[in-house]
Image: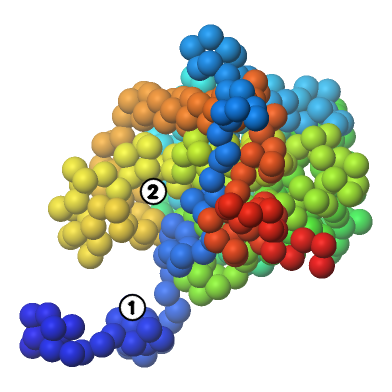
Amino acid sequence: MYDDPAAHGLRESATFDRATIHAIQRAAETGIYDIRGWGAKRRVPHFDDLLFLGASMSRYPLEGYRERCGTDVLLGDRHATYPLHLDTPVTIAGMSFGALSGRAKEALGRGASEVGTSTTTGDGGMTPEERGQSRHLVYQYLPSRYGMNPDDLRKADAIEVVLGQGAKPGGGGMLLGQKITDRVAGMRTLPLGIDQRSACRHPDWTGPDDLEIKIRELREITDWEKPIYVKIGATRTYYDVKLAAKAGADVIVVDGMQGGTAATQEVFIEHVGIPTLAALPQAVQALQEEGLHRKVQLIVSGGVRNGADLAKCMALGADAVAIGTAALIALGDNHPKYDAEYRELGSAAGYYDDFQDGRDPAGISTQNEKLASRLDPVEGGRRIANFLRVMTMEAQTVARACGKAHLHNLEPEDLVALTIEAAAMARVPLAGTNWIPGAGL
């Protein structure tokens, strides 16, 4: 065995690299496909491929300590009596009780409430801990209907009709039996300890006309008070956004392929869907052509990690963003202090993506009471609030540097791209040129 194979002239195949060889060997040994959590690991054009044009002579920057930069956003004022007025455009994406522990859900609600933003239930229903600690709670209405009841719809502050998720557009979710405890089984009306797979499409409609009927039904159940969101996984984004807007959505959520999941087939995660960067301009174009941009609000999710990503989404036309994976990391997931325990599971801190197994040492993606007790929801809420504040302040810093007094004033003109691919997807010029690949074709 060579200590350094490369030093002896051995080359790894670009097509059959070691990860691919391992996947083939695992499939041959087990006869089943691989399931994991997290999101796509492949390199795709992302927000790091964009840069802001800060102000200097041709445009003046704002002074950070003296001139205000607004961050608030109103979501759902198209039809709802009571739209959500958030202090920051960073929201918490839907992550279910079942995938996450009850303490984790409570912590997310605490943190979001502290900074005046919303969190989302995810599949499986509403927990009292989450509702009790969430100032603004969005209730997800999924194909599975797990835990769904009209009373919880009325308790929510908004309803999100989920048609797809970025990590698995066209596919349903999974919750393995080891995470289906008595409480999870009771909320979802499932047999205890048995693997379950959520449906990939809603059982009571087959197209946009049926969606319009369902949205009207949800409005009537909630007396037209609640904003109705429609969430789509980024694939045929231009057409899906147009159809959702015409069906009557107040808010549309577009989730790119970098979005995470608790569990699904790896073939979905890595090979289905399009990058968030490619989906966002398509969604904006669709709304603009319908005369509904800024009237139907657009939330973008999938790989949003920091204030720079937030600012770039706003510049490209989003009204807000939603974070999931970043929020779990802020809570303490993948923390180095648990590295030894991650290694016992065959992983390591920074690599752990076996959320489906329910053995998360951080006590976040688990239903094991002993592990879950490690997470203090008050401390977790403080960490979430800190992270959301930092994201917001980072975005404000960038916006002021571009001479903007509100995050919503950022625009594509403030951006350039580092690569031809990113320039074409984001529809902004390649840095140092006026060229937007594909423009005018």
Q: CA distance from mark 2 to mark 1?
A: 25 Å
- The residue at which mark 1 appears reads as 19
Element under disc 2: loop
**Residue 379 horizontal/vertical position (percent):** 33, 25
Q: Is residue 128 above or below residue 271?
A: above
Name the residue carrying label 2: 365
Vertical placement of residue 348 versus 367, above or below: below
Judging depth in this view, the residue of 163 and 411 nearest the camera is 411
**Foreground: disc 2 or disc 1:** 1
Q: Quadrant of residue 252?
A: top right
Residue 328 visible at all? yes
- Farthest residue toward the top? 66
Label 1 neighbourhood size at 10 Å, few (<14), some (14-19), many (20+)?
few
- Residue drawn at x 23%, y 57% as measured from the top left: 348
In screen coordinates, is 111 left or right of 293?
left
Which of the pair 412/30 is nearer the observer? 412
Q: Position of residue 199 (x, y in %)?
A: 65, 63
